[in-house]
Image (tube, helix red, strand yellow):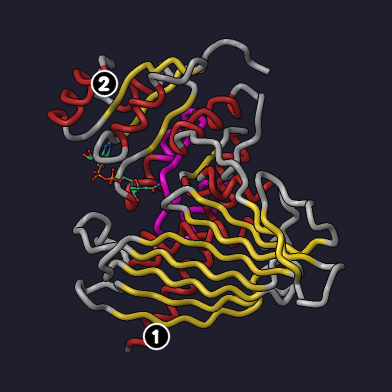
Amino acid sequence: MINEPINIGVIGVGHLGQHHVKHYNKIRNANLIGIFDVDSNRAAKIGKKYDVPVFENVEDLLNKVDGVSIVTPTPNHSEMAKLCIKHNKHVFIEKPITVTLEEADELLKLSKDKKTIIQVGHIERLNPALIALNTYRIAPKFIEIHRLAPYTSRGTDVPVVLDKMIHDIDILLSLVKSPVDKIQATGLSILTDSVDIAHARIRFENSTVASITSSRVAKDEVRKVKVFQKNLYATIDLLLGLTEIYKITGKKDSGRGGAMTVPLQNDSNEKFIVYEKPSIIKDDPLQMELANFINSIQGKEAPIVTGKAGRDALEVAIQIQNMIIQDIH
Ligand code: NAD
């Protein structure tokens, strides 16, 4: 275990990378050494704003750090991560891990050989509303997820499956701990030349079924997960940070946190529906995932979203995307 602060760098300081810089500056056991961006004007602006040294060459930065955040455009993730891992650096790669599965597998193999950590930025896994589920015994039979957003040009260089749905695929794979059995998918291109709305029905080997809808053609933003299982229904609003649980119990007053109970049947004194609103920790998910990366490098925690998890979410996303393309043509 390492007790000294971890020397860290950020590669790519665009829209999201600037927030990595901001948060590393606040993490007590992280020592932000510097940043690198191929756009030197952008790098200078962010360096000045956060008072962080700017490196003109990525290798110079790598020679001074233990790990880096890679926040460059997705097509660059594979090449950049390979370079960093070859320099024996731990990497936090923004999502999706890479464009192709072959690239992801190559990175996983390289990091295993070099004994470095790969962590992936599937930030929703750190959403406090989702974390609130951890105190319940979750064994889903059916899951429904909606992620809808008004159109913006950001992220439209990739299909909605790789930009948005991949967040929910990662959530799904973390909730249903069973291999995927069968996928059906459909989608449409509405505003761009790429797929803008997608729907997938995923059946797992343990017979759990999930329905996921992702769209960038919506009036209002929605990010909701609904989990159904024997004697429990959970609804998680990832946008509002609200988790609500309805469960069956045998005791009228057994709910947590000001819970209400309703008899399951009018004449029943034995079973009640309990409504609970678990308390939510109001932490910033980006700061939490970067702190988890630093603590993992120190050997004090394990990565919450591993490189393997990022690779598995990509595998399902690519299958869905390929099915949609076949369906459209
Ligand atoms: P962006 O275009 O705003 O920023 C990318 C930056 O990388 C730019 O400043 C660019 O100059 C720089 N860059 C490009 N090639 C480079 C290279 N070879 N070396 C160094 N710098 C390079 O993009 P963004 O919106 O910040 O997205 C970056 C990544 O983050 C993407 O993979 C995206 O999918 C991901 N992302 C994740 C989330 C999330 O919810 N986790 C949200 C937004 C973006």
The one of 251 and 34 positioned closer to us in this rendering:
251
The local secondary structure at tag 1 comes to helix
Question: Is the C-beta of the residue carrying label 2 under 8 Å from the nearest atom of ligand 1?
Answer: no
Q: Is 241 located above or below residue 300 in the figure?
A: below
**Residue 7 vs residue 44: left or right?**
right
- Quadrant in which the C terminus is drawn: bottom left
Per the rendering, the mark at residue 25 is none
Per the rendering, the mark at residue 326 is 1
Whole-percent x and y of residue 238? 47, 53
The local secondary structure at tag 2 comes to loop
**Residue 192 vs residue 177: left or right?**
left
Q: What residue type is labelled 2?
A: Phe
Q: Is 208 located above or below residue 137 in the figure?
A: below
The one of 92 and 238 positioned closer to us in this rendering:
238
- Quadrant in which the N terminus is drawn: top right
The one of 144 and 71 positioned closer to us in this rendering:
144
Whole-percent x and y of residue 163? 36, 59
- Mark 1–mark 2 Cα distance, whole angstroms, equals 45 Å
**Mark 1 closeness class: few <14, some 14–19, many ≥20 residues within 10 Å:** few
Q: Is 148 located above or below residue 91 in the figure?
A: below
Q: How many marks?
A: 2
Is residue 48 located in the magenta-colored stretch of the structure? no
Q: Which residue lies furthest to the top in this view?
A: 4
Regarding ligand 1, which quadrant of the image does it lie in?
top left
Disc 2 target residue: 55
Q: What stretch is highlighted in magenta?
A: 81-108
Q: Residue at x 47, y 26 (%)?
A: 67
Q: What residue type is labelled 1?
A: Gln
Q: Which residue is drawn at 51% across and 33% down?
A: 288
Is residue 100 located in the magenta-colored stretch of the structure? yes
The first of marks 1 and 2 along the sequence is 2
